[in-house]
Amino acid sequence: MANSTTAQAPEVFATDAPKVFTEAGHGGAGVHAEPELWGLAPFQIVSVSMLVLFAIALFVGKAHKGIAGGLDSKIAAIKEQLEEAKELRAEAEALRKEYADKIASAEKDAEAMLVKAQAEADSLFEKAEADTKDMVERRKRMAEDKIAAAEREAVQDVRNRAASAATGASRKLIAEKHDAEADKALTDTVIAGI
């Protein structure tokens, strides 16, 4: 029975020395030994390698969860930043529209102000033209009045001089042609008339 348990047990647990195989066809002279690494047979090296691979896979699985969690938090942060960027863009679009409306309104106001200023300038020009005509008329009348006053003054002066000359000439003529008897007769006529 000992042989049957040994035959059924896996070779991993075998503690026998490595078996030496002889290759047929080479004359039986060459002996070939199984390769060993650190005193382990090839099937034992494969078993240890599988255990190491399973340990790495288990560690990577746990690390994967940590990496995935980190990536998920990064994704959430990026999504939040994208939402924030969308909100900022919407606000910027609203501001742009608001300022475009303000610019359009300002242009309309400026155009209306220009039309109003042109109308006021035309009105002021017409008023200035009318005022200038009135002023010219007043100055013309004043000049005409001064000329007429100067003419009247000159005529009066001429009359006064003529009257003065006539009075002087009359005195002279009266003095030459009128004597004391003529004075007496004149005085009597005036008194009789009173």
Image: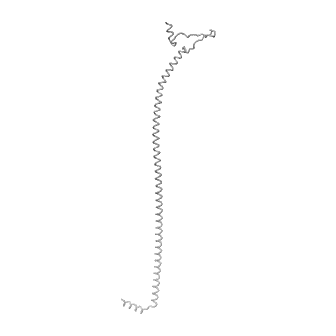
In this rendering, the answer to whether 85 lies above or below 150 is above
In this rendering, the answer to whether 36 lies above or below 151 is above
Residue 81 percent coordinates (x, y): 46, 36
- Number of numbered discs present? 0
Residue 53 percent coordinates (x, y): 51, 20
Specify the quadrant that holds the C terminus: bottom left
Rendered image coloring scheme: one colour
Residue 160 figure quarter? bottom left
Residue 157 percent coordinates (x, y): 46, 79
1 and 186: which one is in front? 1
Horizontally, residue 158 falls left or right of residue 190, namely right
Residue 109 percent coordinates (x, y): 46, 53
11 and 176: which one is in front? 11
In this rendering, the answer to whether 94 lies above or below 189 is above
Query: Residue most toward the left?
Result: 194
Query: Residue most toward the bottom?
Result: 181
191 and 150: which one is in front? 150
In this rendering, the answer to whether 130 lies above or below 155 is above
Horizontally, residue 153 falls left or right of residue 28, namely left
